Amino acid sequence: MRPSYREPHPVTGAGVAVGAVTAFAWLLLFGLLGRDVPGYAWWTLFAGGLAWLAAAVLVRHGDRGVATGVAIVTAGGWSVAAAIVAVRWAQSGDWPLW
């Protein structure tokens, strides 16, 4: 007989959804702290860094499905912030983050 190995924390759709909703709320709350485009971008970058740190801890010691949801939504949130900064930069001709 061949041995069978089972994962202690298999990735599930529910776990990914919980991580995604949690990261969305986290980024939204931090994004609302910014009063202008630079503030929004810096707060989103900071919140995303903390979220990815939490995702790294979850990958190692917790639920990898939740970590996957957090990482996916954080990457999307950073993409939205980068697009907003790029549009402002294109409109004004001045780099908005300094």
Image (cartoon, helix red, strand yellow):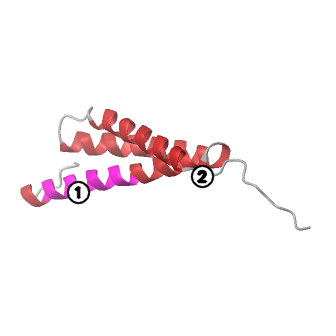
In contact (CB < 8 Å): disc 2 and disc 1: no
For discs 2 and 1, the disc positioned in front in the rendered view: 2
Let me know if residue 82 is in the magenta part.
yes
- Helix, strand or loop at label 1? It is helix
Residue 5 placement: quadrant = bottom right
Viewer-side residue, 1 vs 33: 1
**In this picture, which residue range is highlighted in magenta?**
75-89
Viewer-side residue, 4 vs 61: 4
Q: Which mark is residue 48?
A: none
Mark 1: give few (<14), some (14-19) or many (20+) Cα within 10 Å.
few
- 71 with respect to 7 (left or right): left
Let me know if residue 42 is in the magenta part.
no
Mark 2: give few (<14), some (14-19) or many (20+) Cα within 10 Å.
some
Residue appearing at x 39%, y 54% in the figure: 75
Residue appearing at x 18%, y 50% in the figure: 96
Residue sticking out furthest to the left: 92
- 34 with respect to 74 (left or right): left
Viewer-side residue, 34 vs 55: 55
Magenta span main SS: helix
Q: Which residue is mark 1?
A: 83
Rendered-image quadrant of the N terminus: bottom right
Residue appearing at x 40%, y 49% in the figure: 74
Residue 22 placement: quadrant = top left
What is the three-letter code of the residue carrying label 1?
Ala
Q: Which residue is mark 2?
A: 11
Q: Position of residue 95 (x, y in %)?
A: 17, 55
What is the three-letter code of the residue carrying label 2?
Val
On screen, residue 22 above or below 71: above
Q: Position of residue 62 (x, y in %)?
A: 64, 42
Q: Position of residue 30 (x, y in %)?
A: 33, 35
